[in-house]
Amino acid sequence: MTVLETLQPREVFAFFETLASMPRGSGNEKRVSDWIVSFARERGLDAVQDAMYCVLVRKPGQLGLEDAPPLILHGHMDMVCEKDEGVVIDFENDPITLLLKGDYITADGTSLGADNGIGCSYMLALLASDDIPHPPLEAVFTTMEEKGKYGASQFDVTQLTGKRMIDFNWITDTEILAGCSGDITFILDIPAEWEAVPATHTATRLLKVRGLLGGHCEFDIQLERANAVLVLARALTALLERTDARISSPFGGAQNNAIPMDAEAVISIRPEDVPALEALVSELGQTLADEYRLADPGIRLELEDAPAPGQVFSAAATARVANLTALIPNGVISWNLAVQDRVETSNNLGTIRTTDEGARLMSTITSALTSRKHEVLQRVRALASLAGGGVTVEQFGLDAPEFPYRPESELLATAVQAYRDVIGSEPDVEVSQCSLELGMFSQRVPGLDTISIGTELRDLHSPQESVNHRSVDKVWPLVREVVSRLN
């Protein structure tokens, strides 16, 4: 018996369990992509897989809607891979272990992949159905959504004949999404100017930032949670004011669109400066605990012995890493004056990694205004120019456009009426601060009428991620009803 076998709707949860059994972190989607192709062809459906493993599945209309205009369905198959401290998992190869806790499905110490596994499961259930009236379907499963929307950026939209699209990458069952922001991701490379460890720097310590809540770079950015990469930079800048420290192996964050939960760097230092380092960790740790007692109460700094590295960043490069990281705009940058209580522009410094050349930062800017995204990116370029030392800034992935709200949308009107009839209440029509792939389709498919239908998800992009299974049971009849009305 499987974990979710007793839950309804079974036709949706069966697919969700199948997806959870296949590793599908961003950039590791080949297995699940191949499975979707096999699933389609076993049912006699046309399936096309592109070089980025995005899949388009076509299904004829059925039960009276054979000649209706086609309907595009959309979801992304990749997930953010995060885990709690101490959890051992190989996200490249291991499945997600599902747990059932009351009304919620979660994972055992890792992120769940309900974003966007539940959405893909609705799509698969529609494709597998023989008892749901629906128009001809063009189901698009994209990849690398969580890392720059790379899959959708290169997907050939000329394959699509539909002018209506339902996306399933939304996070609540009380709303129908009718507009959202866009985003742009950049990478910032800082040369290490590698050198041998100075003969005087015989003490080696690993400085760690731990215990943070993390979260989604858009839905949670206004919660003022700590960013582990920025906390690490704060500690390093303070340390460089007191000592001649060098760093190696900087590492932090899971990916660009998740608020970093942890970060670390190896510190090479003179033995006589170790007390100053220990005092700094103690003092700053207490300061952080006080600052984040409400927003991130588990935050802590740790220091432990470490083996001596083979090489370190030069003194100048160490300073560039610390100072540049600390100065990158992060968090809420501006609020939307047109939509109450919505962030207009934000930035999430998501990761720091060691490369052969030095250190690489990856960050995602989200905004309801394309011009504001680029204004923030230009500020980062200006910082890099001032830093010198060969620091470079490059765009990663596509400049994902915003999805503009269309109050006259016929698809929106149909979905709102179906919601009233099926659920018995009035849905909120939401224009969100988040960035989804909707703009990448609505801007490239002329006349595309688009909405997104969601399910109650919590704590996305974190080990606390969960989906309300009663919400799935609530939303599935709505999905069935909406598609059956599209004649």
Image: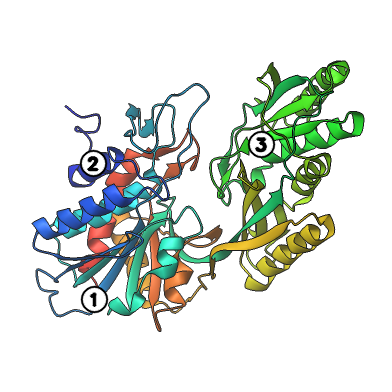
Residue 426, compared with residue 93, is above or below; it is below
Query: Which residue is rendered at x = 44% and y = 27% of the image?
Result: 109
Neighbourhood count class around disc 2 (C-alpha, 10 Å): few under 14, some 14–19, many 20 upward: some
Question: In the rendered image, which residue does mark 1 sit on?
Answer: 70
Q: According to the image, what is the colour scheme of the structure? A: rainbow
Q: Toward the viewer: 98 or 381? A: 381
* Front tag of 2 and 1: 2
Which numbered disc covers residue 108? none
Sequence-wise, which precedes: disc 1 or disc 3? Answer: 1
Q: How many marks?
A: 3
Q: Secondary structure at mark 2?
A: helix
Sequence-wise, which precedes: disc 2 or disc 1? Answer: 2
**Kind of residue indicated by mark 3:** Pro
x, y percentage for residue 433?
A: 58, 59
Q: Are marks 2 and 3 in contact (CB under 8 Å)?
A: no
Query: Which residue is rendered at x = 69% and y = 21% of the image?
Result: 302
Q: Toward the viewer: 95 or 63? A: 95
**Kind of residue indicated by mark 2:** Thr
**Kind of residue indicated by mark 1:** Pro
x, y percentage for residue 156?
A: 35, 74
Residue 336 image-quadrant placement: bottom right
* Front tag of 2 and 3: 3
Q: Residue furthest right?
A: 242
Query: Which residue is rendered at x = 76% and y = 26% of the image?
Result: 268
x, y percentage for residue 159?
A: 28, 77
Question: In the rendered image, which residue does mark 3 sit on?
Answer: 250
Question: In the rendered image, which residue does mark 2 sit on?
Answer: 18
Q: Is residue 486 left or right of residue 303?
A: left
Q: Residue furthest bottom?
A: 446
Q: Does the image show residue 477?
A: no
Q: Are marks 1 and 3 in contact (CB under 8 Å)?
A: no
